[in-house]
Amino acid sequence: MKTFFDLAQTRRSIRKFKAQAVPQDIQETLQETVLMAPASKRSNPWEFIFVENKETLAAISESKQMGAALIKDAPLAVVVLADTEKSDVWIEDASIATIYLQLAAEDLGLGSCWVQMHKRGKADGEKASDVLKKLLDIPAKYEVLSVVAMGYKDEEKKPFDLTRLQKEKIHKERF
């Protein structure tokens, strides 16, 4: 059984996926796991849209200028958004939920890649979040933080090299 340390060391950003669909039971486990993510004052401002439709995935992949093309070929993408009226720290809450989702995916044998949407956009200046709001019928009070592309890995990446740890960034008692 993997320890959390093993999970953290082996989770890498995967951008190439097999065409194999992610089974519903695994999606349900991902859904349950992400709903356990902590949130400030247990406000739970986050919401999640699980997308498998190929046309929708292709449209999501075009929601920002760079870095989203991989979504088109993923069998599953999870749009992570939050109600900005529920929490003033919705970015932090949705970020924690996003990493919960990625770690759960790794634990379940899937690869994933966080695609940043907040403060990103298209070449013409349109915000990625606004593009996704139109595409996915997201109400105005919500903001999209990220999209997590996931599926069965079609590339292998070595675990994080522990010799590259920046130990100088760890301080004791004072900076």
Image: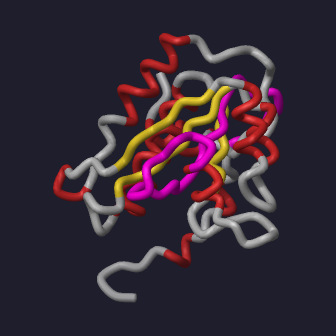
**Residue 160 placed where, x, y %?**
67, 49
Residue sitting at the far left? 41
Q: Can see residue 146?
A: yes
Q: Residue at 74% of width from left, 58% of height from top? A: 64
Coloring basis for residues: secondary structure
**Residue 57 placed where, x, y %?**
72, 34
Find the magenta span and give its range. Answer: 134-159
Q: Nearer the viewer, residue 35 or 5?
A: 35
Residue 156 figure quarter: top right
**Residue 29 placed where, x, y %?**
43, 20
Q: Nearer the viewer, residue 46 or 134?
A: 134
Q: Nearer the viewer, residue 63 or 101?
A: 63
Q: Residue at 55% of width from left, 71% of height from top? A: 167
Count of marks placed on residues = 0
Q: Can see residue 157?
A: no
* In-image side of 26 versus 111 (left or right): left
Q: Residue at 52% of width from left, 42% of height from top? A: 137
Q: Is residue 171 above or below residue 4?
A: below
* 18 magenta-colored: no
* In-image side of 91 versus 11 (left or right): left
Residue 12 figure quarter: top right
Q: Give the position of the C terminus as an image quadrant.
A: bottom left
Q: Residue at 36% of width from left, 26% of height from top? A: 32
* 151 magenta-colored: yes
**Residue 27 placed where, x, y %?**
50, 20
